[in-house]
């Protein structure tokens, strides 16, 4: 049986293409080699496959842990530390998911609804009418505040002003291709002082760690098990030997949740603002649906709106914030999509290419929310949050936040795009974000 084929250019050149123009690289690979191809662009793996066939993805996600093992994600090792859920494997990983999933779902998550709407209004009411602002910066402000609320508890966030600033600076540094390259080329990780990319990056990480350890020590000394925030929950958790989490374990998980829990959502909301204002007919339809709920609708009524759901799904489809799932590793030789894969092969679900399959999404480059009203897609056809045992634990919170922030902005304020130029997607670390951050004009309060 044959091995999957792929581009013949040297791997280092493919890596550079993938870093600087990820969509171009993937589109070319798909046109030439179709649903599965070899793309040695991450780490030093010679056999690294990108899969965009729903049946192949189903095999990958449902044969999880048997043939396809979900290893620690080394690409993110620069951003998230050793004891993060991203880096845990096997039973430890499963246990950590069990602990972390409940606070991001169901009633616990619904409690954040009012806070999300209030925070959005608060931040927008500070903008001056007829000024230009970056949608991505404002949505980042909103989503950092929300995740700080969730992780550390409501009403305590004022204490985290400095932390918020440092996290934003850390994430923004990934718009620099040089800093993004640190993820892909370990040999660039050399500290030549605070002005060198790695030196700057490490110092920011150290400052964030200091603040988090200080908070952990403070909370340990004033421990209150009745609090429902995630830090308290993690501090209360015990493993099967009755051991509590160490300070380092707490720190590593807090970092993960703070980073993974806001950057992606902020990007998704800024894309949604772009699409909705690029197509006035879509904005009008959305407003019609939102206005049908009357004054001061309940967050859960907003959440259930069908056109709003379709707009959010289409936003996450067309430029998925995460282009790839995290990898799976072949444990023993296995067949996938008619190919024989050797042990050690790395396989990534390619979210971006799956979302642009013409057999699933005709005219895939067009923003058409209606496609989500006309047809149901399986979890192997529409997968902005990945799949299987590493599927995103924050999916419900992210969707809830996206819908409430978008609804609050559109119902209360008038915005417009600052110019008619199409906004292009651009790499931001491992994510895909709008280049330039979507410049918009804040016109003021909406007059109904
Ligand atoms: C629009 C927003 C978001 C997108 C597009 C997104 C996407 C993803 C994707 C694609 C994965 C990898 C899944 C896989 O490989 O199968 C992931 C994992 C993860 N996400 Fe999200 N995410 C978002 C928001 C959030 C939020 C709000 C949180 C808050 C806690 C979060 C926390 C995590 C964590 C902890 C993992 C690792 C799960 C594991 O390894 O078991 N994400 N996310």
Image: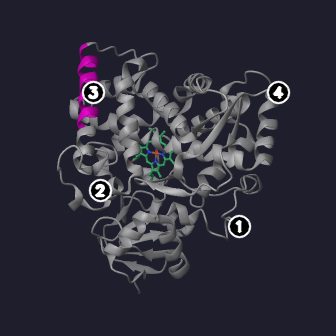
Which secondary structure, mark 3?
Answer: helix
Is disc 3 in contact with disc 1, using a CB cutoff of under 8 Å? no
Q: Which residue is mark 4?
A: 448
Say whether residue 274 is magenta.
Answer: no
Spatial separation of the CA atoms under disc 2 and disc 1: 35 Å
Q: Quadrant of residue 244?
A: top left
Mark before the other along the chain sequence, 4 or 3? 3
Q: Measured along the vertical axis of the image, is residue 139 above or below residue 56?
A: above
Spatial separation of the CA atoms under disc 1 and disc 4: 35 Å
Q: Residue 214, image x and y in percent? A: 24, 23
Say whether residue 217 is magenta.
Answer: yes
Horizontal side, residue 251 vs residue 28: left or right:
left
Q: Measured along the vertical axis of the image, is residue 292 above or below residue 274?
A: above
Spatial separation of the CA atoms under disc 4 and disc 2: 49 Å
Local packing at callout 1 (Cα closer than 10 Å; few below 14, some 14-19, many 20+) is few
Mark before the other along the chain sequence, 3 or 1? 3
Which residue range is magenta in the image? 206-221
Mark before the other along the chain sequence, 4 or 2? 2
Residue beneath the point at 37% across and 69% down: 16
Mark before the other along the chain sequence, 1 or 4? 1
Q: Which mark is residue 211?
A: 3
- Characterize the magenta stretch by its predominant secondary structure: helix
* In this view, the mark in front (2 or 3): 2
Mark before the other along the chain sequence, 2 or 1? 2
Spatial separation of the CA atoms under disc 2 and disc 3: 24 Å
In which quadrant is the N terminus drawn? Answer: bottom left
């Amino acid at each position: 049986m044959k091995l999957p084929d792929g581009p013949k250019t040297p791997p280092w050149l493919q890596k550079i293409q993938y870093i600087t123009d990820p969509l171009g690289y993937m589109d070319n690979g798909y046109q030439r080699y179709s649903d599965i191809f070899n793309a040695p662009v991450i780490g030093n793996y010679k056999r690294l496959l990108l899969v965009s066939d729903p049946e192949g993805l189903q095999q990958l996600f449902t044969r999880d842990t048997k043939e396809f093992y979900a290893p620690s994600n080394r690409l993110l090792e620069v951003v998230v530390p050793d004891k993060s859920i991203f880096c845990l494997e096997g039973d430890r990983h499963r246990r950590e998911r069990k602990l972390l999933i409940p606070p991001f779902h169901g009633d616990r998550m619904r409690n954040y609804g009012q806070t999300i709407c209030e925070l959005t209004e608060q931040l927008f009411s500070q903008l001056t009418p007829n000024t230009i602002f970056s949608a991505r910066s404002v949505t980042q402000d909103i989503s950092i505040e929300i995740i700080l609320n969730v992780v550390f508890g409501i009403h305590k966030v004022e204490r985290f002003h400095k932390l918020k600033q440092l996290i934003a600076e850390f994430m923004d540094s990934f718009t620099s291709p040089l800093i993004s390259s640190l993820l892909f080329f370990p040999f660039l990780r050399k500290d030549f002082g605070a002005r060198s990319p790695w030196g700057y990056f490490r110092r920011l990480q150290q400052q964030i760690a200091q603040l988090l350890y200080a908070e952990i020590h403070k909370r340990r000394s004033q421990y209150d098990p009745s609090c429902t925030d995630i830090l308290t929950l993690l501090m209360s958790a015990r493993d099967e030997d009755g051991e509590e989490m160490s300070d380092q374990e707490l720190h590593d998980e807090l970092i993960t949740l703070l980073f993974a829990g806001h950057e992606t959502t902020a990007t998704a909301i800024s894309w949604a603002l772009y699409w909705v204002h690029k197509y006035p007919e879509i904005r009008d339809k959305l407003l019609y649906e939102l206005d049908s709920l009357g004054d001061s609708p309940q967050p859960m009524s907003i959440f259930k709106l069908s056109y709003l759901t379709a707009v959010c799904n289409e936003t996450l489809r067309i430029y998925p914030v995460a282009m790839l799932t995290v990898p799976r590793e072949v444990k023993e030789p296995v067949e996938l999509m008619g190919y024989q894969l050797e042990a050690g092969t790395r396989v990534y679900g390619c979210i971006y290419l799956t979302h642009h399959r013409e057999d699933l999404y005709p005219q895939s480059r067009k923003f058409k929310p209606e496609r989500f009203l006309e047809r149901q897609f399986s979890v192997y056809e529409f997968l902005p949050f990945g799949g299987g045992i590493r599927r995103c634990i924050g999916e419900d919170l992210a969707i809830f936040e996206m819908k409430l922030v978008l609804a609050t902005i559109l119902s209360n304020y008038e915005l417009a795009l600052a110019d008619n130029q199409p906004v292009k997607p651009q790499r931001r670390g491992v994510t895909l974000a709008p280049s330039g951050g979507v410049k918009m004009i804040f016109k003021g309060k909406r007059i109904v």
